[in-house]
Image: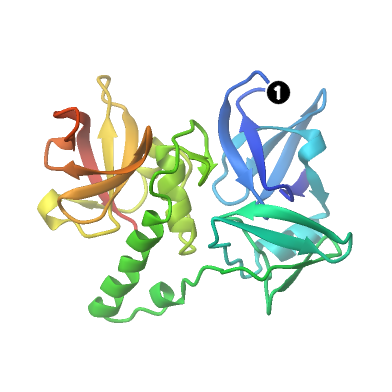
């Protein structure tokens, strides 16, 4: 088995080994993966954070030795909180942009090292300590409020199937990234995320930060959003937007109709 890391701003992950294949996800800067196959200039990978499989262009891949991969995967890894920020590679004397939610493994006092190259990042980074250190119900509520604040950072981001960046994101990518900013790992797709967490029986019992899942005509989970409260949901549908929600589902006030049918609610923290 081989290992790699994304050192580009965004790398598309495709369903098949072809540029014509659909984008099923994206890698952001600093995210790690395992390499399982090479085929005509493509690598089949499985992401380290959520075990999601797909193909990336081998020219966009940065290989890692296993020892370096393990060092980085166990390193404290804050995320970039700026919409776009420059990162400086001191070793190659180059600058490059990275987007919100990018990983900064081993960052300490604005410095970190990957593959023997030294990087400097002077932007804002995520702080999950409030959630990690919450010991009372009141502290937990305050910490969860931070999740809904982070969700608002993506407001109006355009919808993109397979996207995970503020410049294009899908419904499950959106909630995954919001939770990533608090060091909480969610799986990639909505149906996978629905297997995580604890069930909330009624919408009236839901709390801000809970995830609401919706099914299609075949009864399959096909959409997910994050509850701001018991009456509003923020989700990626056309763009990241806020809509009304009740026990039936999401109600679009402009269309004056329900657009998504509520299936279940899950609490992830």
- Looking at the picture, tell me which residue is in the foreground, 88 or 21: 88
Towards the viewer: 149 or 214: 149
Residue 79, quarter of the rendered image: bottom right
* Mark 1 Cα-neighbour bin, 10 Å: few <14, some 14–19, many ≥20: many
Q: Is residue 242 visible?
A: yes
**Res 111 quadrant in image:** bottom right
Quadrant for the N terminus in the image: top right
Reading the image, the residue beneath label 1 is: 17
SS under mark 1: loop
Residue 221 at x, y = what percent?
A: 32, 32
Instruction: Name the residue rendered at 41%, 80% in the picture.
Output: 133
Q: Residue drawn at (62%, 59%), measured in percent from left and top?
A: 103
* Scheme of colours in the image: rainbow
In x, y percent, where is residue 258? 17, 30
Q: Is residue 45 left or right of residue 42?
A: left
Res. 202 in view: no
Q: From what the image shows, is residue 200 above or below residue 125? A: above
**How far across and how far down the image is residue 106, in percent?**
68, 70
Residue drawn 63% across and 34% down? 13
Is residue 145 toward the left or the right of residue 230 in the image?
right
Residue 75 in the image: state x and y as whole percent.
66, 68
Q: Residue at x 75, y 57 (%)?
A: 69
| Quarter-of-image position of residue 208 | bottom left
Counting labels gives 1
- In the picture, measured across the screen, residue 46 lies left or right of residue 243, that is right
* Side of 245 relative to 144 (left or right): left
Q: Height in image: 9 above or below 249?
A: below
**Which sits in the foreground, 11 or 132?**
11
Quadrant where the C terminus is found in the figure? bottom left
């Amino acid at each position: 088995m081989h290992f790699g890391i994304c050192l580009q701003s965004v790398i598309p992950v495709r369903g098949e080994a072809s540029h014509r294949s659909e984008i099923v996800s994206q890698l952001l800067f600093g995210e790690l993966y395992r390499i399982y196959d090479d085929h005509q200039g493509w690598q089949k990978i499985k992401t380290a954070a959520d075990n999601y499989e797909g193909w990336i262009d081998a020219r966009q891949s940065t290989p890692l030795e296993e020892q370096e991969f393990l060092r980085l995967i166990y390193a404290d890894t804050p995320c970039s909180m700026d919409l776009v920020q420059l990162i400086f590679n001191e070793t190659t004397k180059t600058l490059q942009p990275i987007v919100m939610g990018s990983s900064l493994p081993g960052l300490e006092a604005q410095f970190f090292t990957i593959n023997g190259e030294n990087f400097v990042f002077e932007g804002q980074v995520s702080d999950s300590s409030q959630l990690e250190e919450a010991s009372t119900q009141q502290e937990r509520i305050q910490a969860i409020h931070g999740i809904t604040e982070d969700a608002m950072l993506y407001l109006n981001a355009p919808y993109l199937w397979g996207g995970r960046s503020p410049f294009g994101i899908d419904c499950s990518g959106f909630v995954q990234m919001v939770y990533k900013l608090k060091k909480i790992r969610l799986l990639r797709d909505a149906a996978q995320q629905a297997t995580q967490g604890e069930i909330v029986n009624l919408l009236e019992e839901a709390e801000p930060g809970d995830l609401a899942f919706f099914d299609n005509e075949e009864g399959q989970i096909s959409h997910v959003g994050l509850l701001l409260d018991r009456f509003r949901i923020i989700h990626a549908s056309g763009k990241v937007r806020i809509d009304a929600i009740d026990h039936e589902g999401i109600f679009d006030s402009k269309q004056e109709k329900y657009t998504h049918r509520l299936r279940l609610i899950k609490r992830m923290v």
